[in-house]
Amino acid sequence: MNLYIYYAIFSIVLLFGLVATFMIGFSRKNREGDQTYFQHTGVKWIRLTALYVIAIAAGILALVAFIRNFVG
């Protein structure tokens, strides 16, 4: 596989994350404020932790694929 494909995939994921972050930050709900934000924080922490675990696992798998493809 060509090295530039990995760069393209990484760039697309990075840009998607950047755009999604700005869309969430500038959403109407965030601009107006959410009075219930600090309720049910346990569920929010579980969801956030799950997202981080998935992202870290995907990053490790991508790194392993990259190393196997170009080193081995």
Image (cartoon, grey):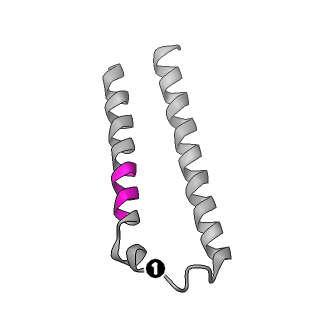
Task: Confirm whether the magenta stretch covers residue 37.
Answer: no
Q: Is residue 20 magenta?
A: yes
Can residue 70 be seen here?
Answer: yes
Q: Residue at x 36, y 58 (%)?
A: 22
Residue 44 at what x, y percent from top left?
60, 72
Is residue 37 positioned above or below 11 on the image? below
Q: Which residue is mark 1?
A: 33
Residue 13: image x %, image y %? 38, 44
For the view shown, which residue lies furthest in the right direction?
42
Q: Is residue 33 above or below residue 67?
A: below
Q: Residue 16, image x and y in percent?
A: 34, 49
**On the image, which quarter does residue 64 sit in?**
top right
Magenta stretch?
A: 17-23
State left or right for residue 1 relative to residue 61: left
Q: Residue at x 63, y 81 (%)?
A: 40
Q: Is residue 70 above or below residue 25?
A: above
Q: Quadrant of the N terminus?
A: top left
What kind of element bears circle 1?
A: loop
Name the kind of residue labelled 1 in the image.
Gly
| Residue found 39% across the figure and 36% down from its top | 10
Residue drawn at x 58%, y 53% is 52
Magenta: main secondary structure equals helix
Is residue 1 in view from this perspective?
no
Pointer 1 local density, CA inside 10 Å: few below 14, some 14–19, many at least 20: few
Of all residues shown, which one is farthest toward the top? 71
Would residue 34 be found to the left or right of residue 45 on screen? left
Q: Is residue 5 above or below residue 38?
A: above
Tally the marks: 1
